[in-house]
Amino acid sequence: MKQIKIYISVTVVLLLAVASKAQQSGGGEANPNLFTHQKALKAFQDNRFGLFIHWGPVTLRGEEISWSRGVQIPKKEYDNLYKEFNPVLFNASDWVKTARDAGMKYIVLTTRHHDGFSLWDSQYSDYDMANTPYGKGIVGALADECKKQGIDFGIYYSICDWHHEDYPVEYPDQKYQFHTEKNITDPEVKMQMDRYTLFMKNQLKELIENYDPSLIWFDGEWEWAWTHEMGMDLYSYLRGLKDDLLINNRVDKGRQGMEGTTKSHIFAGDFATPEQRVGSFDDKNAWETCMTIAQQWAWKANDKVKSKKECIHTLLQTVGGDGNLLFNVGPMADGRIEKRQVERLKAMGDWLAINGEAVYGTRGGPYQPTSYMVSTKKNNKIYLHLLSHPGKDLTLPFPKSIKINKAYFLDGNAQVKVNQDKASFDINLPDSLPDEIASVIVLELNKPAADIDVIERLRY
Ligand code: FHN
């Protein structure tokens, strides 16, 4: 009898593992019935493009947020910068307009980075905006403006806090530890982390209740003091506060390459978070690339800013892989986003004003991204984004069961001649494409594009 029981329990776990993987893992194996909120996930994926904002008192020195504490800037000086922080030119409406002019559909703000400074008036910390010369919270102003201008609002929140007395790792003083979980069983450390976790839950509750974010973007999960069990518990706690909240995979230890535990775990989180690189094609698990428009996350004078072509191609390579792009700017200490970054984002918005149909509400594929082309699909259309001229006619594999009724450039609607044969089609391309950065060809089909499986190989 015992033997049968074991088989049944293993089977149940495996079935739940398969089911939850298919449904996005949501709460992880400790919460087998807590799946990702599918309606919220679809809205997130339909948005495709968001603005990441890294900001805090450190911008007074133009060094990297949190990482410069105790390195480029002495800790004591860093921890007192808030007493000078007075961003009198901060205007939430300007930030949201910059995002909208870029064609972005959501904003994620670093409400509290690893340095522990809270960008709002928190009842659980004096190390916050209320105690700066500026005296007012930023988070609420931005959340209200997002709601007013129809942009989704997300909150970045760091699990590690190198300033907080109850968080047991203090970069760079103590050995900076990845993945080792030693000392977590130490009774003193356990008491500290219990107190610290309660502090985080209290702050997160006040952020959710006061500012109603659509997503929480965790970070700083990689140190030994934060465990898989803590991550699953925090995910479950937050979904209990707001069921349609989306939470990234950094609430737990599941960030690729940063897994703190063996692969056998089902990590909590609703979407994956490749960083400073375009994620690989994946149309089974939601993912979002986060990337800086410059080199640094926080503002730095004369930081190198990516070119217009790099910015647009990064977006298209990401959506072609069925991911979202969270593109980061670092506002200056006075509250303004610098002109160079605003102009670059506007150029992305100008391209999207013409070609946005091929991005918003689409899914990646059916052709996997290559250096010269990515594809997206929506309803009965496939969008071929040509990032460069392939040099000759385009020949692509295509299922004979589906007919291409017509094809045209999205920019200008110039018709395109398509010769469809048994298992492929040819497109005669003009010598020069309408848009030197990226030109989109629309294929209108006689069936939904979702019926076409991912086409692994490309040949042309
Ligand atoms: O250490 C942070 C870093 O400063 C930045 O916030 C990025 C954004 O995803 N996250 C961490 C590094 O993975």
Image (tube, rainbow, N blue to C red):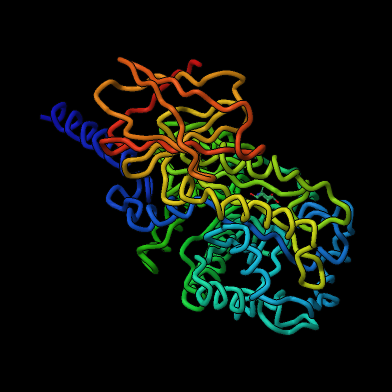
The quadrant of the picture occupied by the N terminus is top left
Q: Residue at x 69, y 83 (%)?
A: 136
In this picture, residue 133 sits left or right of residue 441? right
In this picture, residue 14 sits left or right of residue 28? left
Number of marks in the rendered image: 0
Relative to 364, is 190 above or below?
A: below
Can you give x and y, in whole percent of width and height, for residue 162 in the image? 72, 58
Q: Residue at x 38, y 27 (%)?
A: 454
Can you give x and y, in whole percent of width and height, for residue 131 in the image? 75, 82
Residue 167: image quadrant is bottom right
Relative to 294, is 106 above or below?
A: below
Q: Residue at x 56, y 64 (%)?
A: 155
- Of residue 243 and residue 49, the one placed in the foreground of this image is 49
- Of residue 449 and residue 306, the one placed in the foreground of this image is 449
Can you give x and y, in whole percent of width and height, for residue 262 in the image? 48, 32
Query: In the rendered image, is residue 1 in sight?
Result: yes
Residue 433: image quadrant is top right
Relative to 214, is 122 above or below?
A: below
- Of residue 226 and residue 416, the one placed in the foreground of this image is 416
Relative to 41, is 319 above or below?
A: above
Q: Residue at x 45, y 37 (%)?
A: 408
Can you give x and y, in whole percent of width and height, for residue 264 in the image? 41, 32
Question: From this viewpoint, which residue is outermost toward the left?
Answer: 1
Query: In the rendered image, is residue 283 in sight?
Result: no
